[in-house]
Image: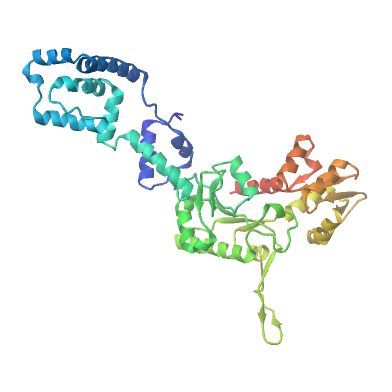
Amino acid sequence: MNTGLSKKTLIRVANAIRNDEKVEIELVDPFLNHTFEELSKLSRVMLKVAAAISLFFASVLVIFPEVGEWLIAVLPGFFLLPERLSKALDYIWGLVGEPVGERHLMYHLPNIIVYAFGVAGLRQLWKKINKNNWKDLVVRSQEKLAKLIEDGTARFRFAPGFSLLFIGDGDQIGKSLVADAPTVGVTISSSRQPYTKLWAKFASGEGDEGFSRALGQVNAADAGEFVLFPVRDEHLFLPGKYDFDIAPHRVDIAVRRIREFEREQGWAEKRIIIIGDKRQTSIFVTESEECRIKTEYDEISLQTISEKYGNLTVLDPTESTLRKIITFADGRRILFRASENGIEKYGKEFYRRLGLLGYNPSREGSLTVGYDITDFETEHQFVSQKYPDYLPVILSRDIYDELHKSNLPDDAYIFVPRLVKEELEKLVSEQ
């Protein structure tokens, strides 16, 4: 598939890849998808003519050798090539086929006609002799770029204001963000994510060297913000104590590394956005022989990290969801409904987190919020339609798709990943 890139652009991009320079992101797909037509229509016609003439000479020499011998006998003496010239021609034929092994020009005429008159033959010969023609340069650079992308070491140039997205395995919010806007930023991850070519490989164990290498693959100085996703998709709302993708103290190290890197580069502090639960905590303790000694450094959470560093925003999916519930409740009493196991796991935490937002009922009526260990219980309560003013909170994309196909209004349920992604898009667009 020819993608319409000009020869000048193809050569420029190919040279950039060959020289390990950054490639503009909008050219990555068109460059990789560009193909060359092997033969033009004119070339094919010329090659057919050349093949017909070549077949005539071949038949004279092979099928009717007596005619060939007669022609050789009557042709002028200069048709007998000097030995050095015949060897030179044989060397050329050896590059593209088989040597002739004869000195008389008659035996060389079929090859001369095909490779001189046939444009495809000329190109094949040129490719054999000189590997630096521009089409071969493009093809080799396409192969190199594809390999670099697979390895997570390709170098890209983004438009200023892009995001540096630190994404773990299965981060649906990050995936959805990139799927909606492929050029929003570079995905920095320990493994290739199938939804984007624009990524850089970095695992937390690689330390400062790996971090610097990953950021060096893009024009990081022009980035608008760093976005971290220390969450698990199945625990976006009311997560348990250890329901995270990256522990809070590891997030603290990541933020410190970012700020140190900025100082080393002489950059102003970029905004850092963290999608995660403010209340999850890493706890460190000091003990003597007699007792535990408390210090102000014992607890690390996204909340303490946000207070410690400037220009940092925590987007808490639980908080965002509760604020949306409060909006729907509109002053009514908020009730929580789940299976017995769901009540045991989430009930107290639901009201504790709601209380932290300071919500107090101000009018008659109630809104019942449904959330459970899996979305199947929540879906059942909603589909049965036996409970009035029921607002399901769901995390599963499959359940969301089912509800969405039912043409239900947006205020009939809360799909947490969509809510969080909308808030993230708003934060990113503010830069």
Seen from this angle, which residue lies furthest left?
77
Instruction: Tell me where residue 89 appears, x and y as whole percent.
Output: 17, 29
Percent from the top left, x then y, of residue 425? 63, 46
Left or right of 22 on screen, residue 377: right
Q: For residue 263, say whether it is visible.
A: no
Name the foreground residue: 275 vs 102: 102
Q: Position of residue 422 (x, y in %)?
A: 67, 45
Q: Is residue 155 above or below residue 134?
A: below
Left-right relation of 125 to 348: left
Residue name at image x 79 percent, y 37 percent: 409
Q: Which residue occupies 56% across, 53% down? A: 225
As displayed, is residue 380 above or below residue 95? below
Asked where in the image residue 384 lies, by quadrant, the reply is: top right
Residue at 78% x, 61% y: name it.
356
**Foreground residue among 44 and 16:** 44
In-image side of 409 versus 56 (left or right)? right
Q: How many marks?
A: 0
Residue placed at 18% from the left, 23% from the top?
Answer: 108
Q: Is residue 123 visible?
A: yes
Nearest the viewer among 333 and 402 is 402
